[in-house]
Amino acid sequence: MDNDSQKNAVETFTRFLESKGLRKTSERFAILEKVWSMQVHFDVETLYNELERDAYHVSRATVYNTIDLLMECGLLRKHQFNSQPAQYEVALGSHFHLVCTQCGKVKEVEADEVISQVMSRRYTAFTPAYVSAYLYGLCSSCIRQNKKKIKPTK
Ligand SMILES: [Zn+2]
Ligand SMILES: [Zn+2]
């Protein structure tokens, strides 16, 4: 993640907290920084553990609360893949998620053409902001495993 996007995120978050009359605590900004350093989707528990590993002690409540604030000001997106706990990612660009229905693995793919098509359409009384799409199916290792399972035994 580049520095510019993080700098913008900090500015957005600062303005948001000010507009809401919320305190600009160092915890909130430390969590934002950590979120920006996460390379993949993460759940709240993973984020909490990462902060602990950095010896940055915040309460779970603060982590949950800050995630909610980051969602509210549009810096984070929430995903629900299968029955996994909610996953988050920073709100940059649009991509598709290929979700394996068997093992739950999630892969991201670019789909610029489809996305720009969907985004440039006109919608009645609606202005789109971004595209979030899930494609459900089977990953290659699950397909391989399933083939092994149905192989007839001698
Ligand atoms: Zn799989
Ligand atoms: Zn994603």
Image (tube, rainbow, N blue to C red):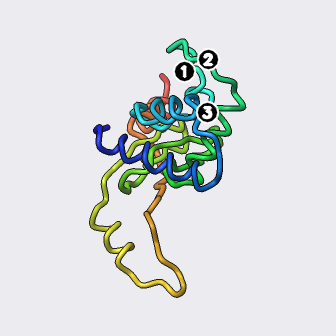
Q: Which of marks 1 and 2 is nearer the N terminus?
A: 1
Q: How many numbered discs?
A: 3
Q: What residue type is labelled 3?
A: Val
Could you say which disc has been placed on residue 57 in the image? 2
For the residues labelled 3 and 2, the Cα–Cα distance comes to 14 Å
Q: Which of 145 and 51 is in front in this view?
A: 51
Name the front one of labels 1 and 3: 1
The quarter holding residue 47 reads: top right
Could you say which disc has been placed on residue 23 in the image? none
List the residue tagged with mark 1: 51
Name the front one of labels 3 and 2: 2
Name the front one of labels 1 and 2: 2
Residue 122 point in image, percent of width and height: 42, 84
**Left or right: 24 with respect to 95?**
right
Residue 102 point in image, percent of width and height: 55, 39
Q: Which of 84 and 57 is in front in this view?
A: 57
The image shows residue 129, relative to residue 21, as above or below, that is below
What secondary structure is marked by label 1?
helix
Could you say which disc has been placed on residue 44 in the image? 3
